[in-house]
Amino acid sequence: MPPRTEKTSALRVAVLADSDTRWKWGALTARRLTTGDGGAPTPRTEISGLLLRGRATPTPRQLAEVGDVGIDTDRVREVTAVEFLHTVRDEGYDVVVLALVGGAVQAMLHGLAALRLPARPVVVTGYVGVVYEKLADGLLLRHGADVVLANSRHDAERFRAVYEGVGADASSVTEAALPFLGGAPHTPEQGRDTVVFAAQPSVPASRADRTYLLRRLVEHARLHPRREVLLKLRSKPGEHTTHIEELPYQRLAEKLPGGLPPNFRLVYGHMGEVLDRTDLLVTVSSTAALESLHRRIPTAVLTDLGVRETLGNHHFIGSGLLTSWDHLDGGAHPEPDREWLAGQGVAADGTYATAYDTARARVTALLARDGLPELAPYYTPATAPGYLPGILARHHLAPDGHPLPGTAGPRETGRVRGAVREAVREAARGAYRHGVQRVAPVVRRMGEL
């Protein structure tokens, strides 16, 4: 394995993600950590993309719609947890970015620790957006990484408080910002009046609530026939994102009485491109609100269904953005609170260019060390014997982090054998996704009748 201190070798970075949004976060975070401006990696930096196989593994269309993240999607490949660990062992990466759900991060940390590499990579993880639920659970599952990125000063303070409160080392918490903020500041255009509702896969969850929001959005379009009203969707039916979407708005729109007005449209694509033509962004609690605020686009967070932790809009208490469709129908535009914005990593004041300086310096310092200490997650077989083994088993790892018997057999060779194996895997993946994305939601809904 090439030593990371060798000045002539390229810095090798691996990004492991388990959904489309986490892929976007992980790939852009890798760029922010290895360049000064978030642009393309330098010639001495090589970034590899890996997708953890599962129910939310993004499709090629979803990868394409993420936008330019500096990694050719043709070079991105799917792996299992065990295959990823073997790749790290064999490829000699300098930095690994874990853009995963908390349980998967914990499993990878224990798996990497079990490799006992003579020179292990620097491990970075974090959150793809607003942290409004499972704060303690998610954070402790991420503990053990060398760098746990916080997207704002507010988050950094909360993260450290959780770690210190359980007696865990909090030095890994590093303040940064969302890596995908950017774009030109909002500029009104003569004759343009566009309202965008940023939909979320699982918020709200019930059919009644989602139908209500869709109906109010359509009614808003009818009330303002000269205004373009767009419903920005995350995925097409059958595709999965970071969260499960059992009731796609596309399906609900097909059944809406009276049909859809001509100034109302469903749109997909890269959020940044949609924001380029947005004059008012409306959402329940989407991270898109932070992207919008960064660009100084008027932004509204709905209270129609209440201000509740389950909706995530409680995160915006004090923001000045909370409002209802009744007020928006009447022409009201919320004004954001400057003090609230300053603590949320929005960086609309121009400080975004330096938001990753501290994190980049920390990674650089870790890379320069002669050796890194062993990974030491808070959860161990001794501290969480009733919790940790189940988390690791879901990724085919034993309680000590080693692959379970039967999951780490000898490497197969030969083109024909490899092609057959890949064909079988592809068929299995298709069957699995069909079961999770199509059959399971139907069964759950039948059970609620």
Image (tube, rainbow, N blue to C red):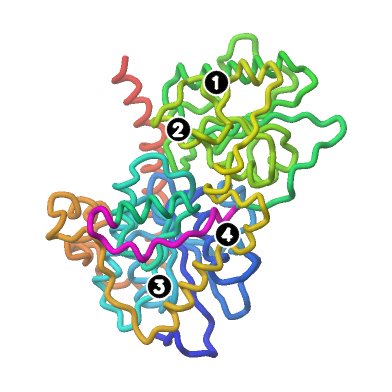
Disc 3 versus disc 1: distance between alpha carbons? 44 Å
Disc 1 versus disc 4: distance between alpha carbons? 35 Å
User: Which numbered dot is residue 314?
Assistant: 2
Q: Quadrant of the N terminus?
A: bottom left
User: Which numbered dot is residue 73?
Assistant: 4
For marks 3 and 2 on the same chain, the one whose residue lies earlier in the sequence:
3
Neighbours of disc 2 within 10 Å: few (<14), some (14-19), many (20+): some
**Drawn side of residue 97 relative to residue 232, left or right:** left
Q: Nearer the viewer, residue 449 or 203?
A: 203
Query: Quarter of the image holding residue 325?
Result: top right
User: Which numbered dot is residue 46?
Assistant: none
Neighbours of disc 1 within 10 Å: few (<14), some (14-19), many (20+): many
Q: Are marks 2 and 4 in contact (CB under 8 Å)?
A: no
Residue type marked 2: His
Secondary structure found at label 4? helix
Identify the residue at horizontal 27%, vertical 66% (top origin): 111
Disc 2 versus disc 4: distance between alpha carbons? 36 Å
Query: Quarter of the image holding residue 410?
Result: bottom left
Disc 3 versus disc 4: distance between alpha carbons? 24 Å
User: Which numbered dot is residue 213?
Assistant: 1
For marks 3 and 4 on the same chain, the one whose residue lies earlier in the sequence:
4
Image coordinates of residue 119 in percent, x first then y, are 35, 82
**Drawn side of residue 434 relative to residue 407, left or right:** right
Point out the frontmost of discs 1 and 2: 2
Point out the frontmost of discs 3 and 2: 2
Secondary structure found at label 3? strand
Q: Is residue 291 above or below residue 449?
A: below
The residue at which mark 3 appears reads as 122
Identify the residue at horizontal 50%, vertical 52% (top origin): 152
Query: Quarter of the image holding residue 263?
Result: top right
